[in-house]
């Protein structure tokens, strides 16, 4: 199919104007109260009863006439005749006259004549009488009829989104059915590479995330999402799916097939079947957005990349949905923060996903194709097109993604299951970015992480026999104002199938290896161990590594290493014992390495880091480390770099 270039990119505000000019009309329907959560009220709600419907006791005690207690004290209690008892839910009618009292339970109706309740703590019973030792005033411990909600009062406005509190109010005034709006929104994900979650994932395929994230987003706005599933990049199939959705929905959201590639056809279908109002917004991420109308039904084509699709949905579509439903304006929750790193923009308006850690703001963007860009983000900042550079320390406003649980610590570096144990035992919430040891050093240098888990081995020229961990790397990088806290030891070795004949490093020539990526401590350790082996045998290291197919490969995670060995794509991989145990692989140990924690000195005295270090040094942590990991005499030792 012929490639079609984007039309002129419309400015952000023009795109907003176009979307807000679209006309969609929600239907009105009656919803059972138990199914009304998250929907938008179609009418105002006026109560036909008082809440509470009768004066009721708010404490266990005795219903009395307040004036009968005015003269009492602890030393001179007043004696009142006890008439009986009123339990909660009673419909019996009682009258209290001068010198009388009724025992009463919390929530029970106040008898005629009584105007106050004496708490049970200030009373005692004897021979059919009650003795009151503390006076009460009229209305004390009594909730009057209608004091919560008065009959004829408007309790909820039209356009209110029904949450737990609203549902409770509606139930308290006796509403069983609720008038709500129904706005059907169709959701279509396009792409030959997409597979529905739950189905088998074949090679070259990815699971469809957009259908479900958009479904949740539409539902959160109070609209009614309809899934049309995954549609292949086939113009006939796509056209048929769109026709079905147009006949059933008030608005259609598609994702994918909106760009200008040869396989992207959504914009062409809209062009031919209706009218395209815009193709491309001058914003990052999310430039490839199509806005059109087919048979009177608006269609908004979102990018296929998950984070781009969700950011564009949150910024443009969600406000439009709430407005169309007549919903009360959603509160745009923001929080002030300080940039924790330098940012560069591209001369285009940008919505940048960011994380918040103790008031400092860090980019959470792993590229528009990464769904983790949003799962790791607490919100986003808007960078105007004229801004090309933002310095560390710049004050910014973060628009939050709803209710967020902000992390206590941002941890980068090499993956290790010990970090999960630290998080569980410390009670802290970590945000982890597994970037490898080199990435951990870089994150500390850039100030974009509080702590880095590092396991980078080195040999100083003058100390060829001894492998040192992390200290030479810190010195070579010129890092200062940091602290290296010694962590624990990890067993490292080859991961092979249970029936493999490989017995050690010397058996690797001719066997296909899946190695770790450059910059990882595990790969660096393998290099050093092969260097030692070559030295002992008197052979050339390069000739030895050249004889190992796949030695130059670079898996970014131990999970990828295990999968390659399990699938037979590799005869051996390199990793820690814990990974082999979890995947039922044979483990052939060739070293023990040191996994340490590099910490920025400025955060060393924060309560969060103190708790982290306290947990690291605890006996409970030592006892709960998974197999292949163990603390040792240096665990918790601190080395300062000024």
Image (spheres, rainbow, N blue to C red):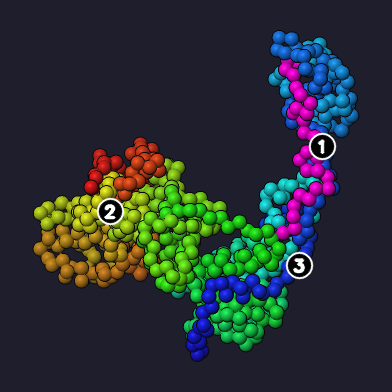
Q: Residue at x 27, y 57 (%)?
A: 521
Of tags 3 and 2, the one toward the viewer is: 3
| C-alpha distance separating marks 3 and 2 | 60 Å
Looking at this view, is 534 or 220 the one in front? 220
The label nearer to you, 3 versus 1, is: 1
Q: Left or right of 446: which side holds 12? A: right
Q: Earlier in the sequence, mark 1 or mark 2?
A: 1
Mark 3 sits on what residue? 27
On the image, the x and y values in percent for residue 134 come to 72, 17
- Residue 349: horizontal and vertical position, in percent? 47, 70
Q: Are marks 1 and 2 in contact (CB under 8 Å)?
A: no
Relative to 594, does residue 523 appear above or below in the rendering? below
Residue sitting at x 78%, y 58%: 43
Q: Say which residue appears at 79% left-offset and 53% top-offset.
A: 45
Which of pointers 3 and 2 lies earlier in the amino acid sequence?
3
The reply, left or right, for residue 192 in relation to residue 43 is left
Q: Which residue is depicted at the point 38% across and 55% down?
A: 393
Q: Earlier in the sequence, mark 3 or mark 1?
A: 3
Q: In the image, which is nearer the foreground, mark 1 or mark 2?
A: 1
Q: How many labels were placed on the picture?
A: 3
Task: State the SS at label 2.
Answer: loop
Identify the magenta region: 131-159
State the mark number for residue 455.
2
| Numbered tag placed on residue 145 in the rendering | 1
């Amino acid at each position: 199919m012929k490639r079609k270039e984007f039309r002129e990119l419309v400015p952000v505000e023009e795109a907003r104007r176009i979307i807000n000019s679209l006309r969609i009309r929600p239907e009105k329907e009656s919803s059972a109260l138990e199914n009304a959560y998250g929907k938008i009220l179609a009418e105002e709600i006026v109560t036909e009863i008082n809440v509470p419907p009768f004066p009721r006791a708010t404490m266990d005690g005795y219903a009395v006439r307040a004036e009968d207690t005015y003269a009492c004290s602890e030393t001179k209690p007043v004696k009142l005749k006890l008439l009986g008892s009123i339990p909660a839910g009673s419909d019996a009618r009682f009258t209290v006259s001068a010198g009388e009292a009724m025992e009463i339970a919390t929530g029970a109706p106040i008898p005629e004549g009584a105007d106050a309740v004496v708490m049970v703590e200030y009373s005692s019973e004897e021979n059919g009488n009650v003795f009151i030792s503390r006076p009460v005033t009229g209305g004390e411990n009594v909730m009057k009829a209608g004091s919560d909600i008065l009959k004829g009062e408007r309790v909820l406005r039209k356009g209110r989104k029904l949450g737990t509190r609203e549902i409770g109010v509606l139930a308290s005034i006796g509403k069983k059915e609720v008038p709500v709006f129904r706005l059907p929104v169709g959701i279509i994900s396009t792409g030959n590479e997409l597979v529905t979650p739950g189905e088998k994932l074949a090679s070259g395929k990815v699971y469809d995330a957009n259908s479900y994230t958009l479904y949740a987003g539409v539902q959160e706005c109070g609209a009614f999402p309809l899934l049309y599933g995954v549609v292949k990049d086939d113009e006939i199939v796509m056209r048929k799916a769109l026709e079905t959705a147009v006949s059933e929905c008030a608005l259609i959201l598609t994702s994918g097939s909106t760009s200008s590639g040869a396989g992207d056809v959504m914009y062409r279908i809209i062009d031919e079947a209706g009218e395209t109002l815009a193709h491309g917004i001058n914003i990052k991420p999310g430039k490839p957005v199509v806005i059109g109308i087919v048979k009177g039904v608006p269609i908004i084509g979102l990018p296929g990349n998950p984070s781009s699709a969700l950011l564009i949905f949150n910024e443009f579509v969600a406000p439009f949905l709430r407005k169309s439903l007549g919903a009360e304006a959603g509160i745009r929750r923001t929080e002030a923060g300080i940039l924790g790193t330098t940012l560069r923009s591209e001369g285009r308006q940008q919505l940048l996903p960011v994380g918040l850690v103790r008031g400092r703001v860090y980019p959470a963007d792993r590229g528009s194709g990464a769904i983790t860009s949003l799962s790791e983000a607490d919100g986003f900042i808007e960078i105007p097109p004229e801004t090309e550079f933002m310095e560390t320390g710049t004050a910014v406003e973060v628009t939050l993604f709803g209710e967020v649980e902000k992390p206590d610590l941002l941890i980068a570096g090499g993956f290790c299951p010990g970090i999960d144990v630290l998080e569980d035992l410390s009670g802290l919430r970590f945000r982890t970015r597994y970037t490898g040891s080199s990435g951990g050093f870089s994150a500390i240098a850039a100030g974009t992480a509080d702590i880095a888990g590092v396991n980078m081995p080195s040999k100083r020229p003058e100390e060829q026999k001894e492998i040192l961990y992390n200290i030479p790397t810190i010195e070579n990088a010129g890092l200062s104002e940091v602290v290296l806290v010694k962590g624990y030891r990890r067993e490292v070795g080859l991961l092979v199938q249970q029936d493999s004949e490989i017995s050690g490093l010397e058996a690797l020539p001719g066997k296909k290896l899946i190695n770790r990526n450059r910059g990882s401590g595990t790969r660096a350790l393998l290099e050093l161990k092969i260097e030692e082996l070559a030295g002992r045998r008197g052979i050339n290291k390069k000739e030895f590594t050249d004889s190992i197919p796949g030695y130059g490969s670079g898996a970014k995670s131990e999970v990828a290493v295990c999968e390659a060995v399990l699938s037979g794509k590799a005869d051996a991989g390199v990793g820690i014992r814990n990974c082999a145990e979890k995947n039922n692989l044979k483990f052939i140990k060739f070293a023990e390495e040191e996994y340490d924690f590099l910490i920025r000195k400025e955060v060393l005295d924060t309560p969060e880091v103190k708790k982290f270090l306290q947990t690291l040094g605890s006996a409970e942590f030592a006892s709960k480390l998974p197999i292949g990991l163990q603390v040792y005499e240096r665990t918790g030792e601190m080395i300062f770099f000024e």
